[in-house]
Each structure stands twice: as C-alpha cells, then as structure tokens.
Amino acid sequence: MNVGKAEPHVAPDHSDPAGPPVVVRVEKLVKRFGDTRVLDGIDLAIRRGEVVSLMGQSGGGKTTLLRCINLLEEPTAGTVEVGGEVVSQDGESLHRASRVQLRQRVGMVFQSFNLFQHLTAAENVALPLLRVGKVDRADAVRRAVDLLARVGLADKALELPARLSGGQQQRVAIARALALRPVALLFDEPTSALDPESSQEVLSVMRELSTEGITMLVSTHEVGFALDASDQIVFIDRGKVAHAGAPRDVVFGSASERAREFFAGFVRYGNGNG
Amino acid sequence: MPDHLASFGPFRVDWISWAPTLGNGILKTLEFTFASFVGAVVAGLLLALMRESSVPPVRWLARIYTEIFKNLPLLTEIFLVYFGLASLGLRLSVFEAGCASLIVFYAAYLSEIFRGGLQGIAAGQREAAHALGLSEREVLTRVVVPQAVRLVLPATTTMLVDMLKSTSLLITISAAELMTVGQLIASTTFRAMEVYFVIGVVYFAMCYPLSMVSLWLERRLKAGTPLSPRRRHLIAQVRLAMPAGAAGGLR
Amino acid sequence: MARSGRTWPLALLLAMCVPVAACASTSAASNSGTSTAAGSASNLGTITPGTITVAVEPYMPYTTEQNGQLIGLDSDIFNYIAQQLHQKINVVVTNFAGMLSDVQTRRVDVSIGGIAWSQARAQVGLFTDPPYYSPVALAEEHGVHVTSIADLQGKSVGTVTGYIFVNAIRQIPGATLHAYQDAPSAFTDLSDGRVNALVIDTLLVIYQAKQDSGTGITSDYLAPPTASQLAAHPGYSAFEPYMTGFYIPRQEARLDSAMNTVIRQMYANGELVKLLTKWGAKPDLFLKPSPGMAQQRHATDRPASWTPPSVP
C-alpha cells in the first residue's frame, strides 16, 4: 500500500447542474437539544465522488450534523436527503425498518473506532454482510479479506481488536464501513484519538479512498488532509455554516472572521506535514 | 439405632451404610439446582431486557418484581409457594414449588447482574452496530450478548453456587435433598459435628467444580476462541482466504 | 416433649392459617365409604385411599426414617396403628415447621413425633387421644443432680430455641439461659461443660446416652412445680407434664376416630407399655394423665364425657 502522498484530486464542478448527482443534501437543518440549538439552519450539498471536510470548533455541531444524516440523531427541523430519498423533513424522520435500510447505504467511521471486541478483524468487516442474508458466507469472507487488503491489513484478519494498534483498528473500521458499498462515508474525527504516526496511516487510506471516487464527508482537524484531499471545506461555527468553499479559500483569507481566527495557527506555522 | 462397628479414625458414623441415602440426597440437590438455574437464567434475562424496554409499564413491572423478590427471604418464599398457595387452591408438587421459589428468588438477582453486563458493553459499539444497519434485535444478539456473557460469567457462577447451597432450605417442604439426609443421620447417630463436617465436604465437592468450569470458560472467552461450530467454520474460511504465509491471530 | 410450643413458628403458621381456616374443608377429596370394620382395609378418607401419608422430622428417639421405614417411639406406635387399620404407609421427611404446615394444608394425613397438644394447634387441626404423656426431664453434666426447679437456681441451663422452656428458664431466679439451634448442639456443649443442665425432650437424654457412652451425662426427672411456685412464676407451667398427640387435618375426622380406637386398645392390651419400655421410658410416668388434662381438652376439642386414656 502506498503510504505516500496521493494524486492531487480533481474536483467535480459544483456550478455545473449537469454534474454528478447530489448524494447527500441538507436544507435548513435544525437540531435542538433542550433549549440549545446545536444546528441552526445548515445547508449542504454533496455530489457523488466529492470529498467534503467539515471543520470548526469542537462542540460546534460537526458531529451532530453527521449523526443527523444517518439518523443516529433525529433532526428537529429541516430536510435531509440521501441518495435522492428524503429521510427527514420538518422533524419527521424515517422509522425503524427504513432507518435500517438507510444505514446500509451510508457508512460511518467513529473517533473511537468502535470495533466489536469479541470478533476478529475479518469477522468485524464481514458482520454487516452476513446478516444481510443475501450474501453467501464464502463471498462475505472473500470480500472481507479483500477490504482488509485494501486498507493494508490482510495479514491481521484473524486478530482481535485488542491486539491491534489504534491506527490498525481505525483502518479495520474503515474496511467495515465499506463492506456494504455505501453511497457515502461519514467520518467523525477519525484521527483525533490517534498518535501522529497512526494518524498518517489512516489519513493515507482516506486519501486513497478519495481518489477512488468514494463520496466522503469528513469531520476533522487535519488541515493538511482538508487542503490536499478534499473538494470543499465547510466551516461550521455555532451551528451555522460560516464559510463553505474551495479549501484554499476557506483556510487562507476567508471572509468569515471566525474562520480566519480558527486557521490562524495553521496559516502561520503549517502543520508540519508540508 | 445403634451404630455398626465400622469406624475410621475419628469418624464413628457408619458412612458406608448411609451411602445410598446420601447418594439420593445428592441427586435431589443437583436436580433442584440445575432445573432452577436454567429457569432463573431465562427469567433473569427476560427481566433484564424488560428493564431496558422503551415501554414504561414494562420497565416498571420488571423493576417492581426485582425490588420485591430481592428483599424477601428465600425461606419465606419457599413457604408461601408451597403452603400459602395451597391454601388458596393452587397445590404445587414439592419439585414444582421448590424450583418455583428458587427461580423467583434468583431471577431477581440475576436480572441485576445481566443488566450490568448489558450496560457494560460500551455504547460506542452499539452505535457502530446501528450505524451499520443492524436491527435492534441483531445488535443484541450479535454484539451485546456475546460480550455481556463474558462480563456476567463470574457473578452468575457465584449465584449458581449460592443456589446449590440454598437448596438446603427445601427441607421444610420435604424435598429429601442432601441437608435433609444430614439431619436424618445426625438425629440418628447424634454425632452432629462429624455429620455436618462430612455434609459440608460434600457440598464443597459439588460447588468447587462449578467454579472451576466457570473460570475455564472465562479464559476461553477472553482469548476469543470460537465456541460455536458456525464461528469456527467462519474462522477457517477466513484463514483460507488470507494471503499465503500470513500468520498470526487465532489458532 | 419440649416441642410442645415453639412459639415463633406457630405465630408464622397461625398468620398463614387464617386463610386456611377460612377456606375450611371445601377440598374435593371426598371419600364416601361406610363405617369401618376393624378387620378390613377400609376407606378412612385419606389422601390416597388405603395409604396414610405421614410427615416426620428426623428426631430420634421419637421419629426418623431409614429406607422408607419409620423408626422411633412415635413411629413404632404409628406403625402398629397403621397395621391394625390395614393401611400402607407413605413417609415424608421435613422439618418441624414443615410438618405442622403439611397438616394444616392437608398435604399429609397425619404428622407424628413429639407434637404436644396445645389449644392453639387444636383450633386448626385435630389431635388424637394422647398415645403417651410427657414429663419433663433434664440432662446433667457429670456430678450434677437436679430433681426440682429450685435446684436450677444459679445454674447455667440450656434448651433449644423456640421450646417453651426458654421463658420458663428465664423466670428461674439466678439461672442463666443458653438457647441452642438444635438438641445435638446442646448436648455437645453439655459434655464440654459449658452448661450445667439441659431441659430437653425426655427420651432424647436416654437415647443419647445409648449412642455416646463415656461423656458422663446423667439424667433425672424434674418434679412438677407446686401450686405456689406456679402462682409466683406462671411460666413454670412449661415444666408440667403435657399431652402428646398425632396431628391430623381437620378434614379427616374419620381417620382421627379410627386411630383413637386403636390407641385405646394399645393402652388396654399392654402394647404401649411394651413400646415405652423399649425406648427407655417409665410407663408409670408416661402412661398416666395428670389432673387438669381432661379439663383442658373439654374446653377445646373433647366432649365433657371424655376421659384421657390411662394404663390401669
């Protein structure tokens, strides 16, 4: 597996209405917890093959936004569309069986990996395939091992998560999220819990995925990745989109004061990765 | 009822001639224990799941049950089930009543243990399971329960051993188990010390292996060794699909 | 016998017996059957026709069970009666509380073994005529002799928890009470010298001496309290001789009268003398009623014309 820098990504043209279809659309999304509006009217459109980085202060609503897309949280108001289907509108969201279906189309990678501790890496990846029932066991196994190979961990297929490093666990988690060929992958600060070396392992995998045409929505603090690998950065501040646009525009000299403050450190010193 | 002359050092009770009676008592004790344990585990699991239900009345029902039966002495329950219910028209046999009281009592404790186990599985894993599109039931059976079993194994074994010893209370409903036999021998020979010492040894000999088996099981679960044939087969298939020469992982 | 009035299990049982008494004998076990002739296996109204189910506690020398056979004094008496009535026997082994409950909920046909007649018990079950009466006796450590209540003053005296003797001993000036969980424990402490005397079931002492020679435990009968002693310490009534009986569910009056007939026969034909002697009891002390006993029964469960049985 190539751990080096990936090819520069050619972004699909947003302004072209005849461009790739919108895979995830969010309109005027509001999410309230008690009296607090964590999301206060978010608009977002992600086309197929796009890689979008979600950035901003912790607690600003990035995680909540991701969770509203696969309905781990139920939106209070607004519209969420996935793959052309409305999954939530005006506070009414899909119920049970449909929700289960939705989540088979959208994969999620968590900050704390959340691998199933009692199963080997291969079993973790194969689990979603096996329970779907349409895939026969031999095929499920083969696909699981292939996915592990894709993230560079084929030889660890029979290890338990406890025996894997953080970076390895997260890569298994990515393979698991890919198992059902989702239309989009959501990443919730995938490297925040990792040391720098492991972070780079995982970011490499993510860069590779980004060049393969997978639609990705990544909540992250890794400015380097956001600049190199994503098509747009959506900067969220206090529940609203402060600036969404081309990565270089958002990071260097954004019209939003909050964005300028946020990226000031990076602008001055870089992130050490060149 | 004079003793026979057979004696062994400080032991003056003729244990050889009492052996068949002891054997019957042991059998009865084991019968009650295992029948009741199976029932209590099932009931305890049911209660634990009820406590997690999203329907409030179901939760409350389980909660009330647990509070009541954790706080009633087992002897009281045995009495009420066998004698009390009889006077209300429901006459249970000795075995039915004995098992019912043991089940009702231990289910309450086991449900608390199981609840702890279910909650002990990091919420993150449940979330990940949901995010993968597993149904509520699948999350339970594929992710939570297998890990919960490992968590609750020590405490559950403790309850099993406790239950085995509690069967001695069933003398009061003429259950003819081991302690009853002990009293028979003690009252006939008047050698209380010796008799209860030997009975104690027998109880120990029944309880200790249970703890040992549980420890063994715990160790295997921790190592992730596949226990079901289905999983073993799956692991074998994975091994075949792996690149040649890739070592490591489960044997 | 000291198990005449363990008060706490009685309280528990009485609490539960209120519904029992209320439900009365509406049970379906209706055995019709005509009057019994002594020579045939007839229907006595037992749970299983032709069989008497009996509950006992392991408590030698009164009752115990071995290989399905009943052993002991009460057992011998009962075996004889069952034989005379041409009934089979089905033994159920439990503890004291279980025994009484078994009768009161009609789980068995009869319970035997040191059950003393008491007014409270007679109100929720039937008692046969006394197969024997029980004086009070003591077991003493080597060298001690106690024949009257006065002799117990200043001594440490043991008994079993729940026996009526507990309160009686408490009323003896200067005496220290030790209450044990069961008779064998009490005897152990007696032979260790931790108590001076035990007030306990009479025949237990004799039987225990047979089992375990060499401890030097002696025994004496206790003289009943005098009228003035009773006036001063009402609790001493526990030291008076009392009636024993076999305890039968209220629904089985026919069994009760059948057994009474045989019991009277056993007084007359010397069978009881034989059995009591076998187990070490003096017939004169055990087979003659005390004054006042008739009156006790008249007030509760016997007609005014009834007299307690006796050897001539």
Image (cartoon, coloured by chain):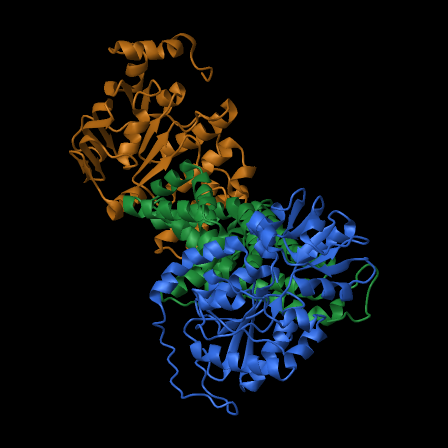
Chain colours: A orange, B green, C blue
**For residue B161, side relative to residue A31 (left or right):** right
Q: Can you say which quadrant of the picture contains the C terminus of chain C?
A: bottom right
Front in this rendered view, residue C197 or A86: C197
Identified at 47% across, 79% down, the residue is C257
Count of marks overlaid on the render: 0
Q: Is residue B141 above or below residue A160?
A: below
Image location (x, y in percent) of residue A79: 18, 33
Q: Is residue A203 visible?
A: yes
Front in this rendered view, residue B206 or A126: B206
**For residue C56, side relative to residue A58 (left or right):** right
Front in this rendered view, residue A236 or A139: A236
Image location (x, y in percent) of residue C62: 64, 69
- Quarter of image, res B30: bottom right
- Quarter of image, res C139: bottom right
Q: Can you say which quadrant of the picture contains the N terminus of chain C?
A: bottom right
Pick out the residue farthest to the bottom.
C39
**For residue A142, side relative to residue A163 (left or right):** left
Identified at 78% across, 57% down, the residue is C217
